[in-house]
Amino acid sequence: MKQITSRKSPLTFSDKEVSETAIAEILQNASWASSSYNNQPWYFISVFRKEKKVFQAVLDTLVPANQEWAGSASCFIVNLATSRYSNGKENKFYTYELGMAVANYVTLAMDKGIYCHQMAGFSKDKLEKVIKIPAEY
Ligand SMILES: Cc1cc2nc3c(=O)[nH]c(=O)nc-3n(C[C@H](O)[C@H](O)[C@H](O)COP(=O)(O)O)c2cc1C
């Protein structure tokens, strides 16, 4: 399946803007991923380059090596998940489940010709000051 085998994490992106509609569709469909008790612990926040101030603020939360290339991306997606089921019990699989949903959206994005480059190199503390993250995530 070429959406999987041609996937890569680019260090430069085209000037073309990705549409909010395309990202919304991709994230919506990513939610078809399986999760324990169908809990769907994932939550995604997208920030588009045209939202200049917040986009720059998110860029500033990245480690320097990521800041060097990530500014050319058209959109950031912040991936969040809750570690509790709705009854308050701990869900030990929430990162696994988030990873499945992310793998879905990376593949769905490829289907639209949109490349993703995932990053763990950022400051969570700084990001929490830039984006309002719901308490449970
Ligand atoms: C959880 C996770 C965190 C990552 N963090 C970073 C990162 O902070 N900076 C970066 O340049 N790449 C990051 N990557 C991308 C990997 O380095 C990249 O996927 C890997 O080198 C394989 O390259 P490919 O995706 O082009 O096949 C991350 C990937 C994953 C899955």
Image: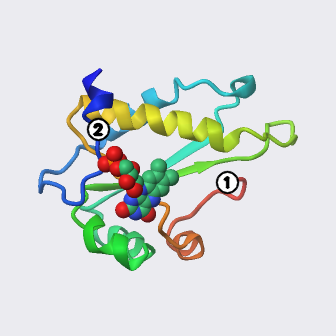
Residue drawn 64% across the image and 32% down it? 40
Label 2 lies in ligand 1 vicinity (Cβ under 8 Å): yes
Q: Please provide percent x and percent y for residue 16.
A: 12, 51
Q: Is residue 93 left or right of residue 45?
A: right
Vertical position of residue 18 compared to residue 132: above or below: above
Give the image quadrant in which the ligand numbered 1 is located.
bottom left
| Residue type of the residue flagged with mark 1 | Tyr
> Which amino acid, by three-letter code, is at mark 2?
Arg
Ligand 1 within 8 A of label 1's CB?
Answer: no
Q: Is residue 4 above or below residue 61?
A: above
Q: Using the rendered image of the protein, determine whether residue 54 is visible from the camera's viewpoint.
A: yes
Task: Label 1: state its secondary structure.
Answer: loop
In three-dimensional space, the C-alpha distance between marks 2 and 1, rounded to whole angstroms, equals: 28 Å
Label 2 close to label 1 by CB (< 8 Å): no
Q: Residue at x 52, y 29 (%)?
A: 31
The label number, if any, that marks residue 7 in the structure image: 2
Q: Is residue 118 visible?
A: no
- Return the residue at label 1: 137
Residue at left offset 78%, top offset 41%: 92
**Residue at horizontal 55 percent and vertical 26 percent from the top:** 33
Front-most of residues 38 and 119: 119
Please tell me whether residue 125 is drawn above or below residue 2 in the rendered image: below
Most extreme residue toward the top, as rendered?
A: 1
Q: Position of residue 50 (x, y in %)?
A: 24, 61
Q: Nearer the viewer, residue 108 or 57?
A: 108
